[in-house]
Image: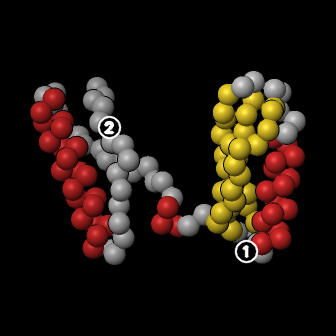
Amino acid sequence: MVRYNIEVKYLSFGKEHTSEVYYNASDNLNEEERESVLQGYLDIVETYKGFEGFLESHIWKDKEENKVRVINNHIFREKHMTDEEMEEKQIEFCKSMRENYKEAGKKLEIIEYSMIEVNL
């Protein structure tokens, strides 16, 4: 299965909108097949209420290294952690994940991280 990303920017009711979808193909698509898939999606977008026109459209093959992954880390503690302790643990986790990916020969970009406290 090969995944393709489709992004379309268009005007609707005088405002710019972006629509993003994925298309799964059983094999790699040639240029003509990609254009056909993109045109099929453009035909759908044209039916949207208030549609006024296209600004941009793109289709590209999804690459493994660009996938966003959610990584969960669980820390079990019996006592409440202060804000400073929580921040320290977040930084420690981010550093260790970057190091693990670096050792595997991959680059890790942390887009967002958060930590919450749960009472058990």
| Vertical side of 36 occupied by 77: above or below | above
Instruction: State how far apart marks 2 and 1 are (Cα).
Output: 37 Å
Q: Which residue is mark 1?
A: 28
Q: In the image, is 74 to the left or to the right of 43?
A: left
Q: Residue at x 35, y 66 (%)?
A: 107
Residue 86: give x, y in percent of width and height.
Answer: 18, 36
Is disc 2 placed on a helix, strand or loop? loop
Amino acid carrying label 2: it is Ser
Is disc 1 placed on a helix, strand or loop? loop
Q: Quadrant of residue 97?
A: bottom left
Q: Are marks 2 and 1 in contact (CB under 8 Å)?
A: no
Q: Which residue is nearer to you in this view: 5 or 70? A: 5
Residue 36: give x, y in percent of width and height.
Answer: 85, 62
Q: Which residue is mark 2?
A: 114
**Front tag of 2 and 1:** 1
| Vertical side of 30 occupied by 118: above or below | above
Q: Residue at x 35, y 61 (%)?
A: 108
Q: Quadrant where the C terminus lies?
A: top left
Label 2 or label 1, whichever comes before in sequence order: 1
Residue 66 in view in this figure: yes
Amino acid carrying label 1: it is Asn
Residue 90: give x, y in percent of width and height.
Answer: 22, 43
